[in-house]
Image (tube, helix red, strand yellow):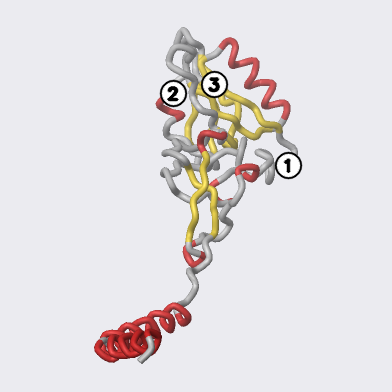
Amino acid sequence: MTRLARALRRTRRAVLARRRPLAALCAGLAVAVGLRANAAPPPPRTTLLVAAHDLPGAGALRPDDLTTRSFAPDSVPAGALESPAQALGRTTVGPVRAGEPLTDARLVGRSMLAGYPGTVAAPVRIGDPAAVGLVRVGDRVDLLAADPQGTGEATLLAHDAPVVAIPRRAAATDLVSGALIVVAVPDATARSLAAAGVTSFLSLTISR
C-alpha cells in the first residue's frame, strides 16, 4: 500500500470517527447564517437638535446651548429642528430641559414682531427683577412709571403690551438695578418708555 493510500485511509477514519460533531457544527453554522440573513436591518435614526443643558427660557440661543442626538423615527416630535443654523440667535419660549429636542413651537419666530404689525421692539428695564421672573414670552403686560422718590401716582405708559423677548441676565458683577424685557409697542409708546426709563422707576402688571 502506498504512503498516499495510507494517508487517505487515516483521514477517512478520522472523519468517520468525528462525523456527529462535524454534522452538528455544520447544522449550527447553517442556522446562524439563516438567522443573520433573515434578521431585519437596524432601524434608521434621525439626528435632532437638542438642548445641551437646562435652558432657563426666554433667552437667545448660543452655540454652547445646543448639541445633537439621534432618535428613532417614531419618536421625532413635529416641527423638530435638525441643524444649529435653525436655532442660533432665536429665543426660547420657556425653559427647556437638557436633551429635550428643540422644535419650532419652543422658539419665538425669526422676527420678534411677527404678528404685531405697526409696532417696534422696545427694551424696557423693570425695577423689580422678581417681577420679571413671573413673566414669559407671549404674556401681555401693563407698564407703569413711578417717581423714584415715591411721590405721586404711577403713570400708565403701555397697556396690554405683548412681551416678545426676555434677554438673559448679566453676571451679578455687571448687573444694574432691575431686569430687562422687550415689548412690542407703537413707536410713540416706545419713545415714552425710553424717556421714562431715564427718570422713573418702571414696573409691570400682567394683564393676561
Q: What residue do we see at 46% from left, 18% from top? A: 171
Would you say the residues marked 3 and 1 are in contact, meaning their CB atoms lie under 8 Å apart? no
Q: Distance between the residues labelled 3 and 1?
A: 23 Å
Give residue 39's quadrant in the image: bottom left
Q: Nearer the viewer, residue 135 or 204?
A: 135
First of labels 1, 2 by sequence position: 1
Q: What residue type is labelled 1?
A: Pro
Tell me the mark number nearer the camera, choosing from 1 and 2. Answer: 2
Callout 2 crowding tier (Cα within 10 Å): few <14, some 14–19, many ≥20:
some
Residue plotted at (43% across, 31% down): 133
Q: In this view, does 154 lie above or below 30?
A: above
Mark 3: few/some/many CA within 10 Å (<14, 14-19, 20+):
many
Does residue 195 show up?
A: yes
* Residue 95 coordinates in the image, percent (x, y): 45, 41
* SS label for mark 2: helix
The kind of residue tagged 3 is Arg
Which dot marks residue 129?
Answer: 2
Residue receiving disc 1: 117
Say which residue appears at 49% left-offset and 28% top-offset: 204
x then y, percent, for residue 174 = 49, 13
> Is 170 positioned to the left or the right of 108 in the image?
left
Q: Is mark 3 on a helix, strand or loop?
A: strand
Q: Which residue is the site of mark 3? A: 125
| Residue furthest to the top | 149
Which x, y percent locates residue 196?
Answer: 60, 16
Tell how many labels: 3
Q: Position of residue 96 (x, y in %)?
A: 45, 43
Q: Which of marks 3 and 1 is nearer the N terminus?
A: 1
Position above or below: 84 against 128: below
